[in-house]
Image: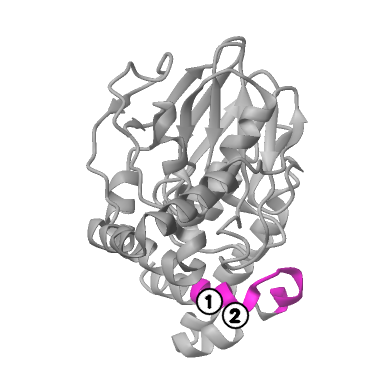
Amino acid sequence: MFDDGPACGKSNSTLLQRKHLNAAHPTRRTACLGLLFMGGSAGFARYFGGLQARETEAANSIEIADGVFVHQGQIADQAPENHGDISNAGFVIGTDAVAVIDTGGSYLAGAALRAAVAERTKNPIKYVINTHMHPDHVLGNAAFKADAAAFVAHHKMPRALTARSERYLRVASEMLGAEAFAGTQIVLPDQLVETSSSIDLGGRSLQLSAQNTAHTDNDLIVTDDKTGVAFMGDLIFSGHVPSLDGSIKGWIETLEKIGNSPAQKIVPGHGPAALSWPEASMPMLRYLNAVANDVRAIIKRGGTISEAVDTAAGGEASQWQLFEDFHKRNVSAAFAELEWE
């Protein structure tokens, strides 16, 4: 976050470099530390000694292609027992440097991923890339601050993440509990991708492509040019029902556009460590089109948003996990968007 180094590799367009203040909630963090000190130095040492010990426990990682590793998160809500480790993350190892792609939903999740990198290589972590702003993908960023890495993201991510930072931290604290939440804070990107850019890791490059509004307004695709593996972030869900936080029309358009990309293997934001492409986009398009088509039909006949929430794309329920947690919100967001088209 505070890196003043050069921009990532050679840019195909504009890679902005910016500094941002840490958006973590200082009052909450100070209060937590104060409670620890009140317990005496022994309690403080036990607490942080335990945290440091847990940092050495490496996350499982799978090598899905030469030098490309993925940690598969759970399909679940964030909870104390999973440390917010509910999304996929990964890293790519070059001859000179490592790039981490997404960091999980807490400091502990990020620390476990960092330990996984250390198990695979001694090369330095020079880049931490966030595919979008959602907390299950970025709240592990703080675990990589000691690496003096550049934090890289879509140019719209800082504004979006800053606007939600207090809520993201509050909800994560409540759902994870004090122990699993410990050390978690917001780390904003300091290198921003306007349209596209390239990162040189030595012997391989990563191509970064900023997308128009789809899953969010700050989706970034990361493609390894050596293997053709593309990290799609939450543009692709598998098993876990999609979660709409951008534009349903934009999401469909983006998936149709990138369906012609040369990638043969992709990493989804949720689901298996790797999927074939473009086959991985088919269930997504089926679901999103079912929602959009049903909502349009309800709007056309003068139906209400309540009717849409209760009935639209109901046939998709058996195809996805966590359907009840996200589907109704997806329909509500789609109705608000499509009502005025």
* Residue 132 in picture, x, y percent from top left: 45, 47
Report the predominant secondary structure element of the magenta stretch. helix
Quadrant of the snapshot with the C terminus: bottom left
Span shown in magenta: 315-331
Q: Which residue is mark 1?
A: 295
Question: Could you tell me how many numbered marks the image carries?
Answer: 2
* Residue 55 in picture, x, y percent from top left: 56, 44
Task: Decide which of 283, 95 is in the foreground and name it.
Answer: 95
Q: Which residue is mark 2?
A: 312
Is there CB contact under 8 Å for labels 2 and 1? yes
Task: Residue at 24%, 33% (x, y): give it.
Answer: 19
Q: Could you say which quadrant of the image residue 328 lies in? A: bottom right
* Residue 125 in picture, x, y percent from top left: 51, 25
Quadrant of the snapshot with the N terminus: top left
Q: Would you call the spot at circle 2 few (<14 residues within 10 Å), some (14-19), or many (20 or more)? A: many
Q: Is residue 73 above or below residue 211?
A: below
Q: Is residue 200 visible?
A: yes
Q: Could you say which quadrant of the image residue 258 lies in? A: top right
Q: Would you call the spot at circle 1 few (<14 residues within 10 Å), some (14-19), or many (20 or more)? A: many
Q: Is residue 311 left or right of residue 200?
A: right
Q: Is residue 321 magenta?
A: yes
Q: Helix or strand or loop: what does disc 1 sit on?
A: helix
Q: Is residue 324 above or below residue 244?
A: below
Q: Helix or strand or loop: what does disc 2 sit on?
A: loop
Residue 165: numbered disc: none
Tag 2: amino acid: Ala
Q: Is residue 79 above or below residue 55?
A: below
Tag 1: amino acid: Val
Q: Is residue 296 magenta?
A: no
